[in-house]
Structure formats: structure tokens, C-alpha cells
Image: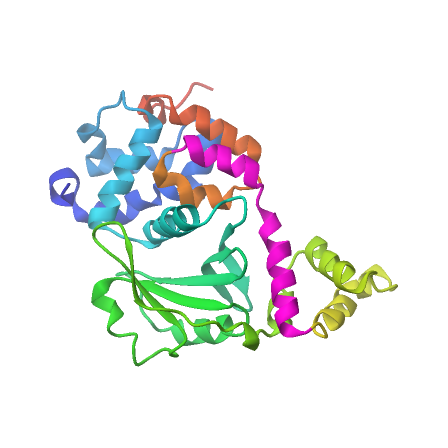
Amino acid sequence: MNSQGIIEKKFLPALSRVFTPIVLDSITQKGFSPYLSEVCVNSGFLKKVDQSMTLGSFFDLVYDLLFKNYRNEYIYKNVIANKILLGKHSLKTSNMLTEFRVGNNKADVIILNGTSSVYEIKSEYDTFNRLQNQLDAYLEIFDFINVITSLSQANKLYSNIPEKVGILVLTDRNTISIIREAKSNKENFNPARLFDSFRKAEYTRIIKEYYGVLPDVPNTMIFNECKKLYCKIPPVVAHDLSIKILKERTNAETLTAFIAKAPSSMSAYAMTISDQERKMCILLDLFNGSIESLFIPKSI
């Protein structure tokens, strides 16, 4: 499929937002997306598709168009979800988090199983301007650090990033090619760096599990006291205990059921709503309906 034969290339960035909350939340809540309707009409895409097709097929069609002509960050996240999380691991033992806060940075994708692996995405449309700061932060938290990029950009990385950082390439064949393997970095884990990324229920559970009890202090002091105790845990132990707790952010059973029925183009998005069972159920119903209603707002 060639973008010039379907829609003009200038409309691809706008169309790529079909996989963002601005569209998917609207579809879930209203059964209609004004943004998606406007993009599809203005680009001429609406005239090129069969409006009797299902929503699931429509998402896959858009995804295929973007993969071949506009591989943005979502495309990379979805390939990681399908090829690494679902292809090599199991949702029973592994978890994928996106946009995970690490200090002033947000890690694009982290996969948690027996250890932690981070994937920093640098698509054809990204620069490497912030990469060094991002890697410096990740080298204090994660076991395996990877940069995944396009083949045309991969060569620029060799001399600019630490040797223990892996280099991956998203190929035209919808596979991930390993250019350089990441090396274990767990011994450099800095507990203070990760603690601020925890939810209260997570850090209190870690402290109670390791020490047996929580500090007997007022609620206003619990964060600081727990952080002090967390930073005293041996780094490797703290890393492994933290991964165990973070893995539980996902409802594996609900997510597995959703992935089994959802279009493959939705795998990465599924990870962002893994604790929202109602939204998953609504989307599964909508996937089987035709797309015609997406472009016709319902009467008020």
C-alpha cells in the first residue's frame, strides 16, 4: 500500500493519532470521534475504505498504512508489544508499561519479567538530542537498556551511547533486528532514582515485605521514611523486589482476554488500559461493529 495511492503524505501524522486517547476515549464514550471523522474526510481516506468493514479491521488497515509509510512512536510500541512481550514472553509472567516516569524522563516502554528491560524509541521522526540524558537515567534503574530505531539511524548510535546499551532496529519485515545485545546493568541500580516512580500502595508494600512492618510515623512522614528504608535495601534485592511489585499493575487475566480478541494493531494501546476492564469490554464490542457510525454522530 502506497500512501500516495491512498492519502497524501501530509495527512499521515494526523491519521496516526487514531491510536491516541483523543480518538479512542471518544469512541469508547460516545461511539463517535469528531477528530477521526474530520481527518478521514479531509484526507479523502473515507472515500477509499469500505464503510461496512468492522472497526477492528479499520484499525488494522490504518496501522498497516502507517507501518509502510509513517512509522511513528506508536508503531514501534506495538511491534515491541507483539514481537517481544507477546512473542517471547507471557502475560502470566510479564508486564509492559509505557511512558513510565524516571525522574524528568519518561521511558517509552519497559518490560518486566524476571528482570527489567527498557526500550527507548527513536523513530525516523525523532532526534537524539535528549538521548544521553535519558540513558543516564535508565542506567541507574533498569537491568537491560535498549534503543530501538530505524536502520538509517542505527549507525549513528555506535559511538554515542555506552557499550552496554543494546541497539535494535525495526525492519521493513515487521521484525526487530538485534544490532547489538544489551548487557546486564543490575549492579548499578540506584534505589533513590526509582522510588519516586512508585505509587503509595507499591512502596509501602515493598517496605512491609522486606522489613516486615511499616515505619510507625504520621502519614505526612510515611513517604520520606519509606524512601530512607528503601534506599538501605541492597541494590540487586531492591531491583528484583521492585520488579515483582510493578508487574502487578496489570490485570493479566483481563488483558489476556482482551488481546485474544482485539486486532493486533491495538496491542500497545491495550497496555495503557490494562486496569480498565470496562473500557476493554466496550472496545471489544465496538471492534465487531461497522465503522459507519464512527463518521455519523449519534443524535442527542
Determine if the magenta segment contains residue 258.
yes
Which quadrant holds residue 141?
Answer: bottom right
Q: Position of residue 169 (x, y in %)?
A: 28, 61
- Looking at the image, can residue 35 be seen? yes
Picture quarter with the N terminus: top left
Which quadrant holds residue 262?
Answer: top left
Decide: is 204 above or below 54. Answer: below
Report the residue at 38% width, 52% height from top.
80
Front one among 168 and 129: 168
Front one among 31 and 100: 100
Report the residue at 52% width, 33% height from top.
279
Going by the image, does 254 lie left or right of 71?
A: right
Decide: is 149 above or below 48. Answer: below
Report the residue at 22% width, 42% height from top.
65
Q: Position of residue 131 (x, y in %)?
A: 39, 72
Question: Coloring scheme of the render?
Answer: rainbow
Tell me where the magenta segment starts and ends, as one range: 234-262
Going by the image, does 298 lie left or right of 196?
A: left
Secondary structure mainly formed by the magenta segment: helix
- Looking at the image, can residue 29 be seen? no
Number of dots carrying numbers: 0
Q: Residue furthest left?
A: 5
Q: Position of residue 223 (x, y in %)?
A: 75, 64
Decide: is 17 above or below 122. Answer: above
Report the residue at 29% width, 41% height from top.
63
Going by the image, does 52 lie left or right of 101?
A: left
Front one among 263 and 176: 176
Q: Residue furthest bottom?
A: 159
Q: Position of residue 296 (x, y in %)?
A: 34, 23
Front one among 83 and 229: 83
